[in-house]
Amino acid sequence: MSDLFDFRRRLDNYAVMGNPVAHSKSPRIHTLFAEQTGEPVHYEAIQVDPGGFVQAVGNFDASSGKGLNITVPFKQEAWALVNERSDRAERAGAVNTIKFIDKTLFGDNTDGIGLVNDLLNNRIEIKNKQVLLMGAGGAARGVLAPLLEQQPAQLIIANRTAEKARELADSFRDLGNIEGSGYEALENKQFDLVINATAASLQGELPPLPDNLLADGATCYDMMYGAEPTPFMHWATQHGATTVLDGLGMLVEQAAESFYIWRSVRPDTKPVIEQLRREMTA
Ligand code: ATR
C-alpha cells in the first residue's frame, strides 16, 4: 500500500478540464503515451462548472499540477487566463494546452498542428492544393494558422453565415491566400482537400455541398469522429473522394503535441490511434 502511495507521489500530475468531460479520450491517450515512453505522468479528467474555470486552474496549480488540456467550453477563457501564449494560440484565440512554468502559465493550441500532422501522416499533401474548410467557429479558427503554414494554393472558408467566413478570412489574410464565402459560392469550384470543421456532424447534419465539389483524388476530412462514419464522410464516399478520414487521428496528434510541450518527449502516435480505433469499434 505504502509502495503504491510513494509511486503515485512521484508521478507528475496532468488533467483535462471541460464540461462535459466524462467521455473525454484524453486520459486514455495520455496514459497510453506515458506507458509507451516511460514518462512518470498521471492524467485525469476534471469536470468544471461554468464560472468555475479560473478557480479550478488555480487549485490545480496549487496542488503542484504540471499541465492541463482545456476543452469545450473553456478554451477561450484559458486563452484570456494564461500569462504567455504561443503564436499559434495567439492566432487561434483559444488555448487547449497549459504548461505551468514556475509562476507562469504558458498557453498553446495544438489542434491545428494535430490536424496537419494527421494529414501528413496519411500522406495527404496540402502544399499547392485547393483546400476548403467548412465552418467559421472556434474549431475552424483553431486550425487556420497551421493549415496556411503548409502553403495551400488557396484556402476557402465556407460557412452557413457567410459574413463570419469573410471576417475570419480577413483576419488571416497576412498568412496566405485565403477567402471566405457562403456555400452557394462553391458551385463550379473544385477542391483537393475538404475539411469539415462545422458542428453539423454532431447534429447528424451535412453542410449544403454542390455535387461536383471534389477534384480527382480528393481527400475529405471530418474533424469529428465516432464508431460510425459521419454524414459528411458518407457524402464524401458517395461523391468519389479517394481518401475519407475522421478526426480520431487529429485527436491523438494534438494530444501528442501537448505531451511534447510538457515532457519534451514525442510519443509514437500510430499504435495509440490503432488502439483507440479498436476500443471505439469493439
Ligand atoms: P465550434 O467551436 O465547434 O467551431 P461554434 O463556434 O459554435 O462551434 O461554430 C459552429 C460552426 O458550425 C459554425 O461555423 C456553424 O455555422 P454558423 O456560423 O452559420 O452558425 C457551423 N454549423 C453548425 N451546424 C451546422 C449545420 N447544420 N450546417 C452547416 N454548418 C453548421
Image (cartoon, rainbow, N blue to C red):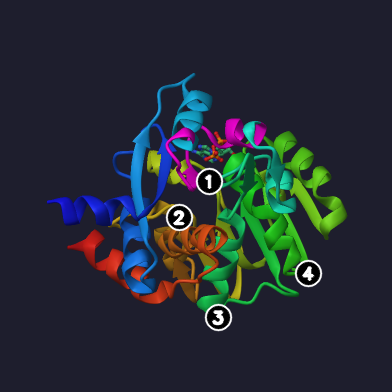
Is any part of residue 128 visible from this angle? Answer: yes
CA gap between label 1 and label 4 equals 23 Å
Characterize the local packing of mark 3: few (<14), some (14-19) or many (20 or more) Cα atoms within 10 angstroms: few
The magenta stretch spans residue 63: yes
Mark 1, residue position: 207
Q: Is mark 2 within 8 Å of ligand 1?
A: no
Q: Earlier in the sequence, mark 1 or mark 2?
A: 1
- What residue is rendered at 48% in x and 66% in y? 239
Q: Secondary structure at mark 3?
A: loop
| Residue 113 lies in quadrant | bottom right
Q: Nearer the viewer, mark 1 or mark 4?
A: 4
Tell me the mark number nearer the camera, choosing from 1 and 3: 3
Image quadrant in which the C terminus is located: bottom left
- Indicate left or right for 81 with 181 as reference: left
Neighbourhood count class around disc 4 (C-alpha, 10 Å): few under 14, some 14–19, many 20 upward: some
Q: Residue at x 52, y 33 (%)?
A: 74
Residue located 30% across and 64% down the image? 276
Asked whether the beta carbons under mark 1 and mark 2 sit within 8 Å of each other, the answer is yes
Which element carries disc 1, helix, strand or loop?
Answer: loop
Q: How many marks?
A: 4
| Quadrant containing ligand 1 | top right
Q: Element type at marker 4? A: loop
Q: Of marks 2 and 4, which one's residue comes earlier in the chain? A: 4
Q: Which residue is mark 2?
A: 232
Amino acid on which disc 2 is placed: Phe
Write the start and end of the magenta stretch as one range. Answer: 62-80
Mark 3 vs 2, N-terminal side = 3
Label 1 CB sits under 8 Å from any ligand 1 atom: yes
- Residue holding disc 4: 153
